[in-house]
Amino acid sequence: AQKITQTQPGMFVQEKEAVTLDCTYDTSDQSYGLFWYKQPSSGEMIFLIYQGSYDEQNATEGRYSLNFQKARKSANLVISASQLGDSAMYFCAMREGIDSGYALNFGKGTSLLVTP
Amino acid sequence: GAVVSQHPSWVICKSGTSVKIECRSLDFQATTMFWYRQFPKQSLMLMATSNEGSKATYEQGVEKDKFLINHASLTLSTLTVTSAHPEDSSFYICSAIGGDNHEQYFGPGTRLTVT
């Protein structure tokens, strides 16, 4: 079963606007971590933001914030004030407990295009 | 932040030959390294988990005799694609875990093209 679901294959947003990228997850672990990565056309994986399952506050990193709704098992990424350089693939990922060996499960990704 | 390098960044090889990809943690000791494969316009799929000094753990469907992984030291893991075929053409990305928080650092990836 898919552990990370990203339902938006592609998104458009106008420059300076905010955009929300959806992510839902499935786990029976109590302790887990949720990540968002950006992958530009060069292929490198750029870490954006992390949310631990026990973190009570939503994580924020500059223009990125994570809307964590634990009961709904969702971890949406919000990018505020979009910039042209934000155009890239965005992946949501989950790391489960120690038994998983700390490997990441990735969603299928969302392609974001920021237009002028 | 911690740095992970991969070499080569891209490689073209002929069908039937073997290719070795190196993954190095440059400024920390990595207890565990992961190898992922990414086909065009798809997500990263975990291939195997590599622990220093022990045999790699392969994900279901990944042939261990085809994708040889050697984690010889705390800073180096290698992936050898043996008898490569065009369907092995892909983007291979390694990551390394270090530190008490088990944070994962990604290498820049290696683009393999088998002709």
Image (cartoon, coloured by chain):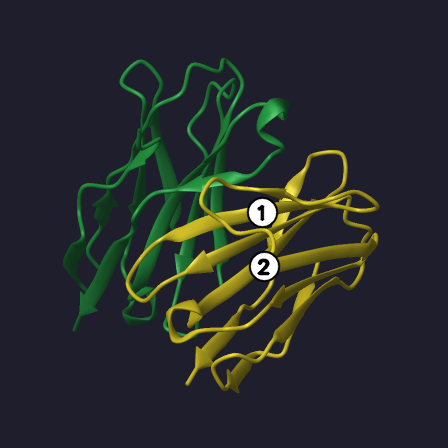
What quarter of the picture does the N terminus of chain B occupy? bottom right
Q: Position of residue A32 (x, y in %)?
A: 51, 24
Q: Residues within 10 Å of mark 1 (few under 14, many from 20)?
A: many
Chain letter for mark 2, please: B
Lateral position of residue A114 relative to residue B45, left or right: left
Q: Is residue B15 above or below residue B99?
A: below
Is A63 or A46 nearer to us in this picture? Answer: A46
Lateral position of residue B61 relative to residue A75, left or right: right
Q: Which quadrant of the structure image shows residue B32?
A: top right
Q: Which quadrant of the structure image shows residue B69?
A: bottom right
In the rendered image, what is the letter of the chain coloured green? A
What quarter of the picture does the C terminus of chain B occupy? bottom left
- Residue at x 50%, y 13% (from the top left corner): A30
Kind of residue at disc 1: Ala
Lateral position of residue B3 relative to residue A50, left or right: right
- Residue at x 52%, y 27% (from the top left corner): A96
Q: Is residue A66 above or below residue A53?
A: below
> Is residue B106 visible to the viewer in this orientation of the structure?
no
The residue beneath circle 2 is: B67
Same-subunit check for callouts 2 and 1? yes
In the rendered image, what is the letter of the chain coloured yellow? B
Kind of residue at disc 2: Phe
- Residue at x 42%, y 53% (from the top left corner): B44
Disc assigned to residue B48:
1
The answer to which of marks 2 and 1 sits earlier in the sequence is: 1
